[in-house]
Amino acid sequence: MILYQKRTLLMIACAFISVTFAATSCSIAQVSSNGAFSVPEGKSPALESASLGKTRNVHKLGNLYFGGQFEQSDIDSIKSAGISRIISLRTDGEVDWDEQGIVEKSGIEYLAFPFMSPETLTDGVFDGVRKALSDSSKPTLFHCGSASRVGGAWLAYRVLDQKVKLETALKEAKTIGLKSPSVQQKALDYIARNLDAEQSVKPGINKSFKDPNLNVNSFVERFEIESREVFQNREAIVEATGMKPGMHVADVGAGTGLFTRMFSRQVGNEGWVFAVDISPKFIQHINQESAKQGQTNITGVVCAENSINLPPDSVDLIFICDTYHHFEFPSSTLASAHRALKKDGRLVVIDFERIEGKTREWLMNHVRAGKDVFRAEIQDAGFKLVEEKKMDELKENYYLIFSKD
């Protein structure tokens, strides 16, 4: 109980105190020569004011609208904005007309997670809202009376599911309309209880990569060498992805940038490559090398331990080569990958076979599980196995392709 209270108080303090965060919690970023990060223009949507007829206090983030109560006469404006779903937090009797009936009659999907007082803001409400918001394919209006309740529910989703810093998420929630200290506290308590829900499957496996004194050249010598199977067969591996010009691709666990640079050439000037890694030193190296080679379609992303830190629906293909076994928090990391993929996106996973009596001892000790376990984890995260590529060149690795289910 004492630990829980301390954690809650710490999170509340984060809302009011400027906190310095480690580079490993940075979101989408391009590394400059001095190590600073900046978001490429047009790559990530920002919260902005909007209008939907006479609807109160409307804001927009991508295809998600936030607002207070709308009137019956606003239905046409809502439909004209392309909104196909409404999520309501209002309780029965708060409006004097059949909101759900009229909305559904207009052809718009209607979901309700009603609560009024903080006492009725249960974990079930938060859970339901989070699940609904996880489907980012539907343009949605998320509303209550004034948007205060909406701001509280959004705060939990933004921190837990989109891995946004608490300080940033709270500022957004208040811009959206959060005014109730009690609702805010309920959200913070819910966040505190859920932050520790997933345990690391292999604590400390990435510790060395976050070392500020990491010797990148030593890893270049280890990763970019003919004796390494995936390096020797890199051309065949890239060809098997089906990558095309103009695509947006994420190289997750990019390391020294071997495949990042190849993908840059493959997608061309109309495409884009996100080099994602937990190591700030690797990302700096990738950006320096891409600058030397004149590759201007690469963005370096220092990810978190439990998220690849890419915005929803931002990439056509995610490529994970000899890195999945380094996921400390596979469930939340895969959830972030699922959100980042576009509707028809593909996930490519190449990793080491782990077979008793066949796999060399170092790999048996280093890789926590075999293909069947990893495949099940990925499918449980909402991906569908499309194909297992059979490549004669790959002796130690398997090659799986998944779609966003």
Image (spheres, rainbow, N blue to C red):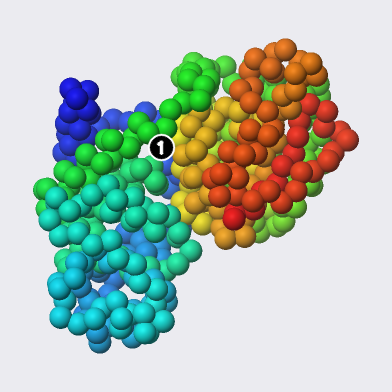
Along the horizontal axis of the image, is 276 left or right of 161?
Answer: right
Along the horizontal axis of the image, is 316 left or right of 226?
Answer: left
The residue lying at 24 percent from left, 84 percent from top is: 72
- Quick check: can you spot residue 334? yes
The residue lying at 23 percent from left, 62 percent from top is: 114
Residue 66, position in %: x, y?
A: 28, 65
Residue 11, position in %: x, y?
A: 22, 34
- Front-most of 88 and 323? 88
Q: Tell me the quadrant of the picture where the C terminus can be found.
A: bottom right
The type of residue carrying mark 1 is Cys
- Quick check: can you spot residue 264? no
Residue 136, position in %: x, y?
A: 45, 60
Q: Is 119 rendered above or below residue 17?
A: below
The residue lying at 32 percent from left, 40 percent from top is: 165
- Front-most of 375 and 44? 375
**Mark 1, residue position:** 26
- Front-most of 334 and 256? 334
Q: Tell me the quadrant of the picture where the N terminus can be found.
A: top left
Along the horizontal axis of the image, is 296 left or right of 198?
Answer: right
Q: Is 355 rendered above or below residue 51?
A: above
Residue 87, position in %: x, y?
A: 32, 66
Circle 1 sits in a helix, a strand or a loop, which is it?
Answer: loop
Check the image and name the residue furthest to the top.
Answer: 361
Along the horizontal axis of the image, is 251 left or right of 63?
Answer: right
Q: Is 286 rendered above or below residue 335?
A: above
Check the image and name the residue furthest to the right.
Answer: 392
How many labels, in total? 1
The residue lying at 39 percent from left, 46 percent from top is: 161
- Specify few, some or many for label 1: CA neighbours under 10 Å numbering under 14, 14-19, or 20 or more: some
